[in-house]
Amino acid sequence: MNNKKEILIGFIVGIIANTFGTVLYILLFSDLGIVETFNAAVSQGHIGSLLALGAILNLVAFFAFLRIKRDQRARGVMLATLVTALIILLYKVMA
């Protein structure tokens, strides 16, 4: 299969895993709803931490792709994680 397509699939899986991880963290550890927790994290300057905790689920996707020998997809998940890290860095610098 085309390498770029495989990397794109991994990237999309990484973004979905990060989003799902963030929502799962909010549901498990917050007394507020999803939107309220997100808004509170933005107002208190903790959005970077929230996104970083959500990115932990990318580890599962990354190692799952490596285990089934889908290295290009694992590379896409790593790219999604790096994009998330850059977004967090930009948010911290601009705040």
Image (spheres, rainbow, N blue to C red):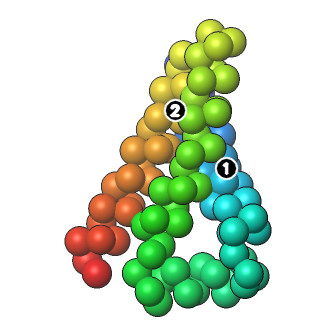
Asked whether residue 87 is in view, the answer is yes
Q: Secondary structure at mark 1?
A: helix
Closest to the observer, 55 or 3: 55
Closer to the chain start, of discs 1 and 2, is 1
Viewer can see residue 23: no
The residue depicted at 68 percent of the width and 12 percent of the height is 68
**Drawn side of residue 16 relative to residue 56, left or right:** right
Pointer 1: what residue?
16
SS type, badge 2: helix
Note whether 93 is above or below 8 in the view shown. Answer: below
In front of the other: 7 or 44: 44
Relative image position of residue 16 (x, y in whole percent) = 67, 49
**Type of amino acid under label 1:** Ile
Q: Quadrant of the C terminus?
A: bottom left
Q: Amino acid at mark 2?
A: Gly
Crowd rating for badge 1 (residues with CA inside 10 Å; few <14, some 14–19, many 20+): some
Percent position (x, y) of residue 2?
A: 58, 18
The answer to which image quadrant residue 14 occupies is top right
Residue at 54% over, 49% down:
55
Q: Residue lying furthest left in this view?
A: 93
The N terminus: image quadrant = top right
Which residue is depicted at the point 30% across and 62% down? 89
x%, y% of residue 65?
63, 21
In the rendering, which numbered label is found on residue 3?
none
Inter-mark Cα distance, 1 to 2 = 12 Å
Count of numbered tags: 2
Q: Is residue 89 left or right of residue 68?
A: left
Q: Mark 2 highlights which residue?
A: 76
Foreground residue, 39 or 30? 30
What residue is at 48 percent from the left and 56 percent from the top? 52
- Image coords of residue 21 (percent x, y): 66, 54
Classed neighbour count for the residue bearing mark 2: other residues with Cα under 10 Å, few (<14), some (14–19), many (≥20): many
